[in-house]
Image (tube, rainbow, N blue to C red):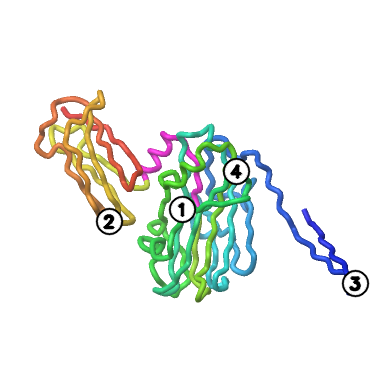
Amino acid sequence: TTITLTVSNAQGTNSAVKTVTVINGTAGITGPAFESFEATGLPANWSIVNPSGGPWTQVFTAAKDGNNSYMIDGSQSGAGEQDFLNMPIIDLLNNQNDSLWFSYAYAKQTGTQADKLVLQGSIDCGGTWIDVVSLSASSMANGSGGTTSTPFTPSASHWKNVNVSSYPYWFNLQNSPSVSFRFVFTEDPAAGAGNNIYIDAVNFIGASNGINELTKSYKLNLFPNPSNGEATLKFNLNDAAVVNVNVIDVLGKEVLPSASYNYGAGEQNISINKNSTLSKGIYFVNLSINGAKMSKKLVIN
């Protein structure tokens, strides 16, 4: 919608025309949704706002899932420029157990590059926004594309997964039937002309799907299983994390002492039932990584 404002006085008349985007408050996502941008063009109820330069653009040469993703060519972005990728409105009130995930790949142009990616949420159709996830250039580049002056195109190992639902501000939105989300990429306010960032695999998934997705993202495995005694919990971290582990029986009773670890990035192995103290039966090994929870069933023969 365009609005024209006209002001007149003794010196004459002047007019200004503004474009106003009116957002339908009805949720476009009311249950599990999977978006990997495989169809050409923006999916239904998505939108892009590029004030100037380096816009969000669909590319067909890099992806976490499928073949396509959306990216910003930072070399075309001016200092401090912000570009917006808007998602469909989501009903969180009636999907309390569902999780929102996305994947990104990014490289810094220089060691001091200060780009930022923020996922914002709004419960008043974009009247006000809160930062739900805020990622600095250094945190994004670590475990992804690092620093390179060469235009960055990610390989499979460069993609990093984000569980939006594990961030504290998610709970400020959960009681709304119409939550707006948008990706906001801000180019370095001092330098501009950075490298590339990619977004893919934006998924709103149910609890069971969420656990499966978590397990895949961390390459979680428990072996041997069944076991006659000791088992090994193996997983991979893209970044440093606080990891908590406990083991319970089928009645929910903790049967081994819980443990907490501070790990760096890389492959990790934790011994379970090292002293073979567990009796024959079925147990559940619960793993928490920076608050994201997963569980594996363990059978002791």
Whichever of labels 2 and 4 marks the residue nearer the N terminus, that label is 4
Question: Could you tell me how far apart the alpha carbons at marks 1 and 4 are, in whole angstroms?
Answer: 17 Å
What residue is disc 3 on? 10
Q: Where residue 297 sits in the image (x, y, percent)?
A: 27, 32
Between label 2 and label 3, give the one nearer the viewer.
3
| Circle 2: residue type | Gly
> What are the residue bounds of the magenta stretch?
200-216
Mark 3 residue type: Ala
Residue with the mark numbered 2: 266
**Which residue is drawn at the image coordinates 48% and 38% (left, top)?**
205
Report crowding for label 1: few under 14, some 14 to 19, many 20 or more residues within 10 A (C-alpha).
Answer: many
Q: Residues within 10 Å of mark 2 (few under 14, many from 20)?
A: few
Labels 3 & 1 near each other (Cβ < 8 A): no
Q: Is label 4 in a helix, a strand or a loop?
A: loop
Q: Secondary structure at mark 2?
A: strand
Q: Measure the C-alpha gap from mark 2 to mark 3.
A: 72 Å
Q: Determine if the magenta segment contains residue 215.
A: yes
Mark 4 Cα-neighbour bin, 10 Å: few <14, some 14–19, many ≥20: many
> Mark 3 or mark 1: which comes first in sequence?
3
- Compared with 52, 231 (above or below) is above
Whether residues under marks 2 and 3 lie with C-beta atoms below 8 angstroms apart, the answer is: no
Coordinates of residue 73 in the picture (x, y in percent):
54, 67
Q: Please state if 27 lies on the left or on the right of 173 as rendered.
A: right
**Contact flag, marks 1 and 2 (Cβ < 8 Å):** no
- The residue nearer to you, when weighing 17 against 145, is 17
The three-letter code of the residue at mark 4 reads: Ile
Disc nearest the viewer among 1 and 2: 1
